[in-house]
Image (cartoon, grey):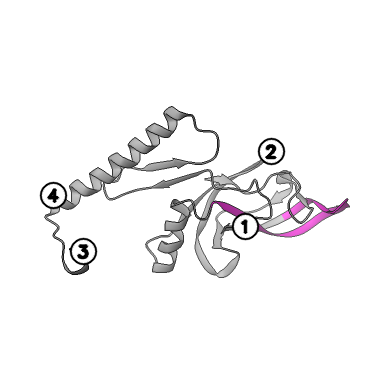
Amino acid sequence: KGIATTPTTDKAGDIVEPMGAEFALPLPLHHEHDRKDVVGQVIEAVATPEGIEFTAVVAKDVSAQIAEVWKRVAAGLIPFVSIGFRALQYEQIKGGFRFTKWAWDELSLTTVPCNQQAAITAVKAAPAAQNPVVIKRGNDMNIAEQIAQFEQKRAAALAAQTALITKGATLAGEDE
């Protein structure tokens, strides 16, 4: 989950108005705007005057490359997103353009966004125990929420460990 864009001035000096977005779901989810590196889909998006909130899914079981991207997202190494769009209506403003109507073509997971507020705000994963882990990001968590998050991650890890022990998993080769 996250915010795809906001009406703030980006690094290019442009403003992309969230309410001006035209799109149809699902949208492709790319890695670093590489059309050959599709990693998932945007399945929900809601435009408000403050920004576009989105929910995306990553197809992490499809390939090793996608699994690697997913690990980086989950670890917070890829914390931002960036929109790929085509301008439909715009006006020149000091330093750039204000896009008032635009066609949203894709969303990309990225390390360097043009809009610094376009970010991943939560990551949800289903570990082996099928207990979802939600990782909130940003400064909106208090100490109690942080502790609860760590306890949830610990419980999921212990459940996965217990599942391995129950199955009778043994270490072999490099795992020893």
Residue named by callout 1: 112
Which secondary structure lies at badge 3? helix
Q: Which residue type carries mark 4?
A: Thr
Q: Which residue type carries mark 2?
A: Glu
Which secondary structure lies at badge 2? loop
Residue at image point 48% right, 51% down: 76
Residue named by callout 4: 166
Residue named by callout 3: 175
Mark 4 / mark 3, whichever is N-terminal: 4
Mark 3 / mark 2, whichever is N-terminal: 2
Q: Position of residue 141 (x, y in %)?
A: 50, 33
- As measured in the structure, the alpha-carbon distance from the residue carrying label 4 to the one carrying label 3 is 18 Å
Q: Position of residue 26 (x, y in %)?
A: 55, 55
Q: Are marks 3 and 2 in contact (CB under 8 Å)?
A: no
Give the answer, above or below, for where 11 lies relative to 152.
below
- As measured in the structure, the alpha-carbon distance from the residue carrying label 4 to the one carrying label 2 is 49 Å
- As measured in the structure, the alpha-carbon distance from the residue carrying label 2 to the one carrying label 1 is 21 Å
Which secondary structure lies at badge 4? helix
Q: Are marks 2 and 1 in contact (CB under 8 Å)?
A: no
Q: Position of residue 39 (x, y in %)?
A: 49, 62
Residue named by callout 2: 50
Instruction: Please say whether residue 63 is visible from this viewpoint.
Output: no
- Which one is nearer the viewer's eye here, 52 or 31? 31
